[in-house]
Image: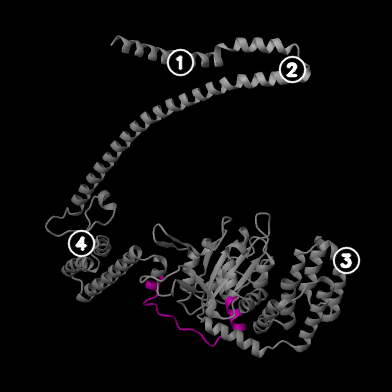
Amino acid sequence: MSEFLGFAWELLAKVVYNVVAVVSSILNLLVFGWVEYFNIFMTYFTTFDLVGKIGAVILFAMLIAVPVLIVAILIHHYRINRRLHRDDTSNKALYREIGRLNKQVLDLMDEKNKLLALKVNAMGGTKQIPYVGASALADDHLPTVGNVVGAAAGTATGAGTGEGAAATAVMSGNASLALDGAGVKDAAAAMAKATVEAKTLAEEKEIAQANRFPKLSLVDLKYRDWESPAYDDAISLEDFVDSFRAFACSQMKLYYTPEIIRRFVAGMAASKLLILEGISGTGKTSLPYSFSRYLDNPATIVSVQPSFRDRTEVLGYFNEFSKRFNETEFLRAVYEAGLRQDPSMIVLDEMNLARVEYYFAEILSVLEMPSHDEWVLDLVPTQWAADPKGLHDGKLTIPDSLWFIGTANNDDSTFTITDKVYDRAIPIELNERADAFECEPHERVHVTAEHLQYLFQKAKVEYVIDDELLQKMHKLDQYLQTRFKLAFGNRIIKQMYDFIPVYVACGGTELGGMDYIIARKVLKKFESMNVSFVRDEMKGLIEYIEKTFGEGGLPDSVMYLQRIQNFY
């Protein structure tokens, strides 16, 4: 036994000795050894040259940095632990306070429900009067049965009983009305009206709960029993322009020149996208808005935000978490346009606050498809049973009766609209306000989009562009290609053939329509060029235009070139 004790003592003593030696070595390394380090440093420092002294100082500074860094890390961890402990204590107190407040809220809600029950059923008996609003708690007099009849349908629907509860509430209301002397017909009409309203509310609630496209499904519900008005299929384009000008003046106190309206209507014939440009306050937004009012189909105004980056900003997106599609007003307007026969408009207000070629790129591409069957937007990959009836395999077709109208200000807060967008659109400048005038009152008109398209096609047959004018246009095209490397392009030629006949049918002239297209669609490309290199050539271009088309033949184009020439 004594030998074992001796063995244990010697072994443990060696372990303790080694531990003490390690601790002592660490203390000597980090604390007590600095006197020896400093003596060694001073012994050799005086014998070094300049380079050696600098190296010695750097080495000694690095040695000092090691323990300082270790101490800083230890202090930092100590502070973090203290803070976490303190925050944990504070959070526990906060959680207890939140729990106490939640319990008080629940108690107050229970007390409120009891007061509501007492107030609503204060008339006694077995008859249950539905709650009619917050005023029931504040009013001194109790609601009568007659006052409650209208609210019965909504209360019954909110309680989940649907048509049956609404009908029951209406019948009890009708009994009281009969006692007051009302006729049986009035009671039956009131009951039928309340039943229809309850049915509609129940369907809306069901759509909102079970459909991933609630807005579009509500549009289906809106047009389920919709009756279209009597359409006027005898109106001509010139009467169409004149009557709209009279309507805007008499009904909305808005004044437009016949020229602006001709360009607007002819632009609708040439493109599904129109861009209204000009200084602020000239009526860029009010023009399509009043035009849609004239057609008795108010336009949808979409305010473009600087944050618009892609198609989801205008079309929305499918939320995988909620299993619903985040619908936008733009999407709702596109869908609703497919359910109407008259022309529809969507106004992209301040469209160049963001880059149009980013958020509107897909729609621009779709509208370029030659066949209307290809004007399809992919919303979701598959079709669900409860999807709106206007969606087919998760795709939505852009209707031919829909036009997109963009308004644009040209200032430092906006982006430049690129040639890609301009080539596909018809730009219309509104830089002047029209003078006020007096006219006879004029009502709205009802015209189908099909009839409007028929008038456009009829104009192309009746007002074929003169061959001599086309030859002059081709000569100008060759001149621009030779001198400036500019060309009309196939898209611009097609738009010209669509624009000019309708412009003439609206009361304009062939030369005036061609002048406008050349100025806004061809010569506008000078703005994207380095005009300082071709400014001297512009004078020759102006002379060529006046020689080819006659002096004053293309006033808009000449004025546009002079403005660019003076600007640069």
Q: Are marks 4 and 3 in contact (CB under 8 Å)?
A: no
Name which residue type carries label 4. Val
Give the crowd class for mark 3: few <14, some 14-19, many >=20 residues within 10 Å. few
For label 3, the SS is helix
Residue at 58 percent across and 12 percent down: it is 33
Residue 233 drawn in magenta: yes
Q: Which residues are magenta?
A: 219-245
First of labels 2, 1 by sequence position? 1
Task: Quadrant for residue 429, please give it.
Answer: bottom right
Name which residue type carries label 3. Asp
Render colour scheme? one colour
For label 4, the SS is helix
Q: Quadrant of the N terminus?
A: top left
Residue 339 drawn in magenta: no
Residue 18 is marked as 1
For label 1, the SS is helix
Residue 20 at what x, y percent from top left? 46, 13
Q: In whole angstroms, how far apart are the C-alphas of marks 2 and 4?
A: 104 Å
Residue 536 is marked as 3
Left or right placement of residue 538 versus residue 280 in this view: right
Q: Would you place residue 278 above or below residue 55 in this image?
A: below
Residue, disc 4: 145
- Comparing labels 4 and 1, the label whose residue is closer to the camera: 1
The answer, for residue 425, to whether it is visible in the render is no
Residue at 50 percent across and 25 percent down: it is 76
